[in-house]
């Protein structure tokens, strides 16, 4: 073979080899970017993950030396910046921060890192929500009647105003309470409309107001607009509604509030005060107003019992417990105006308490007593007819004083009261909360109470009832 032929053969082989190398290089690039096999990240991505993990651990170490406040007082005491709660470890919003980190690293590595951080956080520092939950669980039950001191009270019966009483009882928290109450009043109509539209599925009014962050904390109580007091230093077991039948006693209202609110707070009760106001000039119907107050109060909170309280009565002993114990209960064992006695043993008026279930079993109070007299004895008869044993405090514990007024609001006597009382059992199944009808009330929230103004009218007389004179 000639030299020239050899050179040509060698050149062809070389060209072939170069073509093969080029083809292999082309195929390698094509496979990497076509998705035929997984694309390998740069080697530096592993180091990036390591740096991310180290940075996260540094954040964890930094935050583990800090303690989140449980409440406003602890916050001020510890002087901790609010920015601390924004870290991915301690903040309740940490999930969103971790999600942002997940998008920058491999998902598997991110999950491992997230689990590791959460485990460390659980071991080193519980979240703020967890702290609050444990604090609530650790609260001891609020005291009962046996735990209260036998301490006599001296009532202040001097005239005053609502503005003065608000400032006296709320102090530096008054302005914040007024602002919260104003917001709640503006929101109340829409809350009521929503409750009517979804009925049983609706949250209570107080629960909705609480979710609006309108509660004010001071001393050892939390106050919701409308006079709903919740103790913070102990766990309340039962909720009490104080319902006051009312008309034109504006001089007595601040005196009553100035006395009753501190007393109920001394007893560590969870309570609300409802003024059930008759908004017309026809004869006063105390019992019907009590029915209205009971029904409307349950729209605010699911109370366990209700205490019906005349506005001119002031309890004189801390141990006269207004909680839901020993009900039905007549809280009065003597009054100053009667020589520290009660006028007759069967008396069940002035200040009486009954549980929600007991109230339903007796169908509430009668709606037919227009004018003064008879409704208390009808109430007592209903309770007795259902086998409920009434209780009463003994001796000085049940003493009450009264605020003097010129004339009784129910000064017009009910001439038919004795006839009505004689046939109370006949009417009882169909005369009470079962046939209660009234126009939608005007409800207004105040810092210390909720006012329910209602235009009550006589209800149709049931033909099955014995008709008394004037009915």
Image: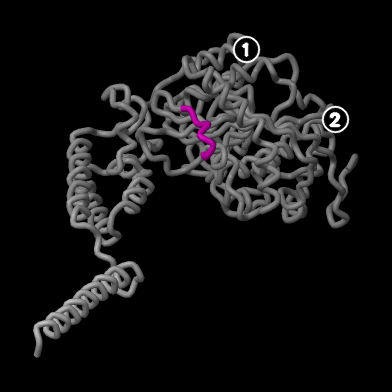
**Residue 39 on the magenta segment:** no
Mark 1, residue position: 161
Which residue is at the front of the view, 140 or 368? 140
In the image, the segment drawn in magenta is 211-216
The residue mark sitting in front, 2 or 1, is 1
Q: Count neighbours of disc 2 (C-alpha within 10 A) and say few if under 14, some if 14 to 19, many if 20 or more.
A: few
Which residue is at the front of the view, 375 or 57? 57
Image coloring type: one colour
- Image quadrant containing the C terminus: top right
Which residue is at the front of the view, 339 or 62? 62
Mark 2, residue position: 282
Query: Under tag 1, what secondary structure?
Result: loop
- Image quadrant containing the N terminus: bottom left
Give x and y (percent) for residue 295.
66, 44
- Residue at image coords 53%, 17%: 175
Q: Do the residues bearing badges 2 and 1 touch, measured as CB atoms within 8 Å?
A: no
What secondary structure prevails in the magenta region? loop
**Does residue 328 appear in this view?**
no
How much space separates mark 2 and mark 1, taking CA atoms? 27 Å
Give x and y (percent) for residue 344.
62, 33
């Amino acid at each position: 073979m000639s030299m020239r032929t050899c050179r040509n053969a060698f050149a062809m082989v070389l060209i072939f080899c170069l073509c093969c190398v080029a083809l292999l290089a082309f195929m390698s690039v094509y496979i990497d970017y076509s998705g035929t096999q997984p694309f390998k990240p740069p080697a530096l991505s592993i180091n990036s993950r390591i740096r991310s993990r180290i940075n996260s651990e540094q954040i964890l170490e930094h935050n583990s030396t800090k303690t989140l406040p449980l409440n406003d007082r602890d916050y001020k005491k510890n002087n901790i910046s609010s920015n601390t709660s924004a870290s991915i470890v301690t903040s309740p919003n940490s999930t969103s921060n971790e999600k942002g980190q997940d998008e920058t690293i491999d998902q598997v590595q991110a999950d491992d890192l997230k689990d590791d951080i959460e485990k460390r956080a659980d071991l080193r520092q519980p979240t703020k929500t967890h702290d609050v939950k444990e604090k609530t669980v650790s609260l001891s039950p609020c005291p009962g009647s046996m735990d209260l001191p036998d301490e006599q009270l001296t009532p202040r019966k001097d005239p005053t105003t609502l503005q003065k009483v608000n400032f006296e009882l709320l102090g530096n928290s008054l302005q914040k309470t007024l602002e919260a109450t104003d917001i709640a009043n503006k929101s109340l109509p829409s809350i009521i409309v929503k409750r009517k539209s979804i009925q049983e599925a609706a949250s209570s009014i107080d629960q909705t107001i609480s979710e609006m962050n309108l509660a004010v904390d001071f001393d050892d109580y939390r106050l919701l607009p409308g006079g709903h007091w919740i103790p913070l230093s102990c766990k309340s077991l039962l909720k009490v509604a104080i319902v006051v039948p009312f008309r034109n006693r504006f001089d007595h209202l601040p005196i009553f509030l100035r006395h009753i609110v501190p007393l109920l707070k001394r007893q560590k009760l969870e309570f609300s005060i409802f003024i059930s106001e008759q908004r017309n000039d026809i004869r006063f119907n105390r019992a019907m107003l009590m029915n209205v107050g009971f029904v409307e109060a349950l729209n605010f909170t699911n109370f366990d019992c209700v205490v019906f309280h005349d506005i001119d009565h002031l309890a004189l002993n801390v141990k006269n417990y207004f909680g839901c114990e020993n009900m039905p209960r007549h809280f009065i064992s003597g009054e100053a105006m009667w020589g520290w006695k009660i006028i007759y043993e069967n008396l069940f008026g002035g200040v009486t308490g009954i549980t929600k279930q007991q109230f339903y079993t007796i169908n509430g109070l009668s709606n037919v007593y227009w004018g003064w007299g008879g409704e208390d004895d009808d109430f007592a008869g209903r309770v007795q007819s259902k086998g409920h044993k009434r209780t009463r405090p003994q001796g000085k514990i049940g003493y009450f004083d009264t605020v003097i007024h010129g004339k009784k609001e129910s000064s017009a006597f009910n001439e038919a009261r004795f006839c009505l009382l004689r046939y109370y059992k006949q009417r009882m199944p169909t005369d009470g909360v079962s046939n209660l009808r009234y126009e939608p009330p005007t409800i207004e929230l105040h810092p210390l109470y909720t006012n329910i103004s209602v235009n009550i009218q006589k209800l149709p007389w049931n033909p099955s009832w014995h008709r008394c004179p004037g009915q």
